[in-house]
Amino acid sequence: MSQESLETPVLTHLDTQGQAQMVDVSAKEPTQRQAVAAARVRMSAATFQAIEAGNAPKGDVLGTARIAGLMAAKQTSQLIPLCHPLPLHKIEVQIFADPQLPGYQIQASVTTKAETGVEMEALTAVSIAALTLYDMAKALEKSIQIESIRLLSKTGGKSGDYRE
């Protein structure tokens, strides 16, 4: 093992006393950044068919979930401690029917030009879209499962690009 691998990693969200702190990004130059996240929502075939047919008791399940994801991305810094509020330039939330699950694949893409990345905004968008889908369909089925919330990719920033 190299000496470098034995060094203790720097924990940027802790101050010298071990207290949580927001990282100071004021010295960083704003750069173009994008993050894409995904989630799956699995349900029974009957629930899936009812949503696809537009027969859910609460109304437009997918449209409501998509809007919730958009709104959630904009609120990330208020939901996740120590997240920086960011100027979001573009947010896309897409929900794709997946009869093989059966259920839905959710994907969110968030873009900014800022000093820090938008991974948390993309992850928050898919999480809240999935939770809203559950809420809108729970009258049909309580056992709906939210699965595999994950970062698919990110671009920009000091740590470089990432792709799942």
Image (tube, rainbow, N blue to C red):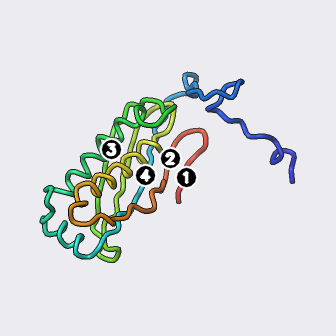
Question: CA–CA distance between discs 3 and 1?
Answer: 19 Å
Q: Amino acid at mark 3?
A: Ile
Q: Earlier in the sequence, mark 3 or mark 2?
A: 3
Residue 14 percent across, percent down from the top left: 65, 30
Residue 155, disc: 2
**Mark 1, residue position:** 162
Q: Earlier in the sequence, mark 1 or mark 4?
A: 4
Question: CA–CA distance between discs 4 and 3?
Answer: 10 Å
103 relative to 26 in the view: left or right: left
Provide the secondary structure element on which disc 3 rests. strand
Q: Look at the picture and state if 55 lies above or below 92.
A: below
**Mark 3, residue position:** 91
Provide the secondary structure element on which disc 1 rests. strand
Which residue is located at x 47 percent, y 30 percent?
84
Q: Amino acid at mark 4?
A: Val
Residue 161 percent across, percent down from the top left: 55, 49
Question: CA–CA distance between discs 4 and 2?
Answer: 9 Å
Q: Look at the picture and state if 93 lies above or below 84.
A: below
Could you tell me which quadrant the N terminus lies in? bottom right
Q: Earlier in the sequence, mark 3 or mark 1?
A: 3
**Mark 4, residue position:** 36
Q: Amino acid at mark 1?
A: Tyr
Which residue is located at x 45 percent, y 41 percent?
118
